[in-house]
Amino acid sequence: MKVFILVLCLVPAMLCDYVKIPIQDCGENFEDIPCTISEVSVDECELDNDKCELIRGEDYHMDVKFTPNFEGSNITLLAYALIGSDALPFEGMNPNACDFMKCPVESGKPQSYIFNVNIGVLKPKGIFTTRWLMKQNGENRCCFVNKFKIL
């Protein structure tokens, strides 16, 4: 059943035009993370300088290509809007990363994590910096930051 659900999630993603978006590392508090992010893409994203433009009320697929330098399962992906010194968690995201990628992960083997992002109609318009943080048993494993412009 899990494989069937994963296929249903991936088929629409494979039919979309993905746009590679600029990313940054997560800063000095995340220097020793055992993961390399090679590329992040979003379907149907229009780039405005370094920001991916997204429309409220729409669904998007995000593809994160990475190489873990760790092994195992029990992996979560959390997203935070960075506003001032606060990191506010995204609501409504399925945090179980293994629902969207092959688990257990194997050290040194490239992976792709494809998932759906819904931009709710009640989300405020504006430019937002977002931190995407993958954890395993509570420890930081992968991290990147990007900017979205919500229209």
Image (cartoon, rainbow, N blue to C red):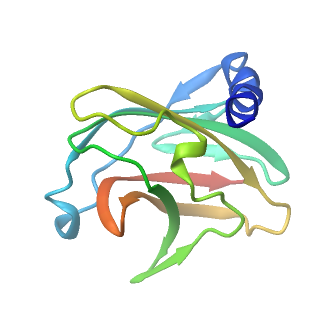
Q: Nearer the viewer, residue 129 or 41?
A: 41
Which residue is the extreme one toward the front?
Answer: 1
- Residue 107, position as x, y percentages in the image: 23, 35
Answer with the quarter of the image where residue 29 lies: bottom left
| Residue name at image x 64 percent, y 44 percent | 53
Determine whether 68 is above or below 136 in the image.
Answer: above
Determine whether 47 is above or below 10 in the image.
Answer: below
Q: The N terminus is located in which quarter? A: top right
Answer with the quarter of the image where residue 93 lies: bottom right
Which residue is the extreme one toward the top?
Answer: 15
Compared across the picture, whether 84 is left or right of 142 comes to right
| Residue name at image x 40 percent, y 39 percent | 104
Compared across the picture, whether 89 is left or right of 33 comes to right
- Residue 76, position as x, y percentages in the image: 48, 58
Q: Nearer the viewer, residue 92 or 76?
A: 76
Answer with the quarter of the image where residue 121 lies: bottom right
Q: Nearer the viewer, residue 65 or 136?
A: 136
- Residue 43, position as x, y percentages in the image: 65, 30
- Residue 11, position as x, y percentages in the image: 73, 21
| Residue name at image x 60 percent, y 24 percent | 18
Determine whether 73 is above or below 66 in the image.
Answer: below
